[in-house]
Image (cartoon, helix red, strand yellow):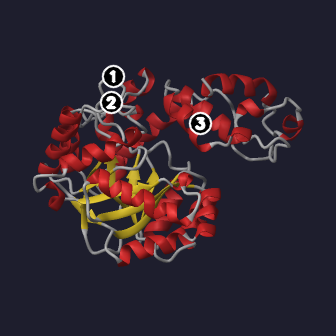
Amino acid sequence: MRFRPFGRTGWDVSALGFGCMRLPTKDGRGAGDQVEAEESIAMIRAAIDGGVNYVDTAYPYHNGASEVVLGRALRDGYRDKVRLATKSPVWMLQKAEDFDDYLREQMTRLQAEHIDYYLLHALNGPRWESMRKLEILRRAENAVRDGRIGHIGFSFHDGYPAFEKIVDGYSGWELCQIQYNYMDTENQAGTKGLRYAAAKGLAVVIMEPLLGGRLANPPAAVAEILAGDAKGRTAADLALQWVWDQPEAATALSGMGSLAQVQENLGSAERSGVGSFGPEDFALIERARSAYRERTVIPCTRCGYCLPCPNGVNIPRNFELANDAAIHDDPAVPRLLYDRFLEENERAGACVQCGECEEKCPQSIPIREWMPKVHKVLGG
């Protein structure tokens, strides 16, 4: 296993982290609470035996079963071999006391007297303001003082301006978790956010390095390009190596769903390193990225001229999610983001067909025609 500096903490983290959001399930879909517990425990322990020293979960993963299974996996001395991260479900915190109630429940699930890294989960601009008003970080600091948690961080889903505001809004952050891969260099926090947080001394944990597995199973046109890799690497290996080439990335979380994936990713991590990518590798990734982008169906540049919508619809974000579904030929993740991270009035289904946006769109996109189509795909 290769190890990398974890921000300003003075600790080195394994290049590969184990993300417990997509454990194997009885229905084979990697979702819900019907986790194949024994198989999952064997996978987690195999990863730790292979050098992984960072494991990550969250309150809602597998409807709570993820924390329970991970707690079982960390018995028999395995807890001492790793640093444990989980997340507070900030959207469920209605009053300050809720923070402690959920933390207590999570510690019970995890059979843990101490959580090394406790993150505010899925922060965006509005949620950050809510956490500030509730003074949740005071609660977190109290938990650090009494030993329930070790370090405070956040995971993020929003645009770069919100990311910078959150990073600068609290001096006690020690880590952040962002979605980042070779298709998300300008989405959410993006490369700019990665470098900004690292420059501030935060450890940057990378989630979705394979975009929920989609970069590991590309459409035929992209797969044909990646098959030209002179080193014979798989699509998954190439995507992970691209992330690990970034010096600001501390660890890449992989939501592994089988023991074979664990072994494959351990092998990839062993070959990882900053500067391991050469010009030909970057050129190959750029060709793949271009092939993905050619699958875009709505010519939206996210310029924002269509905003504000009088009904509150977030037109660029709806188009971005619809394009993402088309690019990867997989609507599952965009549907999840549409449902979980857009308010009802922000979704395409809230369009009232007024046409005000079309008058301002420099791309002349027939927005009124697209909105019901987008909702049909994402709201399904």
Q: Which residue position is annotated with label 3?
A: 339
Q: Amino acid at mark 3?
A: Asp
Q: Closest to the observer: 229 or 34? A: 34
Q: Are marks 1 and 2 in contact (CB under 8 Å)?
A: yes
Can residue 246 be seen from the camera position used here?
A: no
Q: Amino acid at mark 1?
A: Asp
Q: Which residue position is annotated with label 1?
A: 27
- Residue 170 % position (x, y): 53, 74
Q: Which quarter of the image is occupied by the N terminus?
A: bottom left
Q: CA distance from mark 3 to mark 2?
A: 22 Å
Q: Mark 3 packing: few (<14 Cα in 10 Å), some, or many (20+)?
A: some
- Residue 51 % position (x, y): 15, 53
Q: Amino acid at mark 2?
A: Gln
The answer to whether 39 appears left or right of 195 in the picture is: left
Q: How many marks?
A: 3
Foreground tag (3 vs 2):
2
Task: Give the image quarter of residue 339.
Answer: top right
Residue at 29% x, 25% y: name it: 26
Q: Closest to the observer: 358 or 136? A: 136
Q: Are marks 1 and 3 in contact (CB under 8 Å)?
A: no
Foreground tag (1 vs 2):
2
Residue 144 lies, with reference to residue 317, above or below; the image says: below
* Helix, strand or loop for disc 2: loop
- Residue 250 % position (x, y): 33, 60
Residue at 82% x, 41% y: name it: 311
Q: CA distance from mark 1 to mark 3?
A: 22 Å
Q: Closest to the observer: 209 or 257? A: 257
Residue 258 lies, with reference to residue 51, above or below; the image says: above
Disc on res. 34: 2
Q: Earlier in the sequence, mark 1 or mark 2?
A: 1
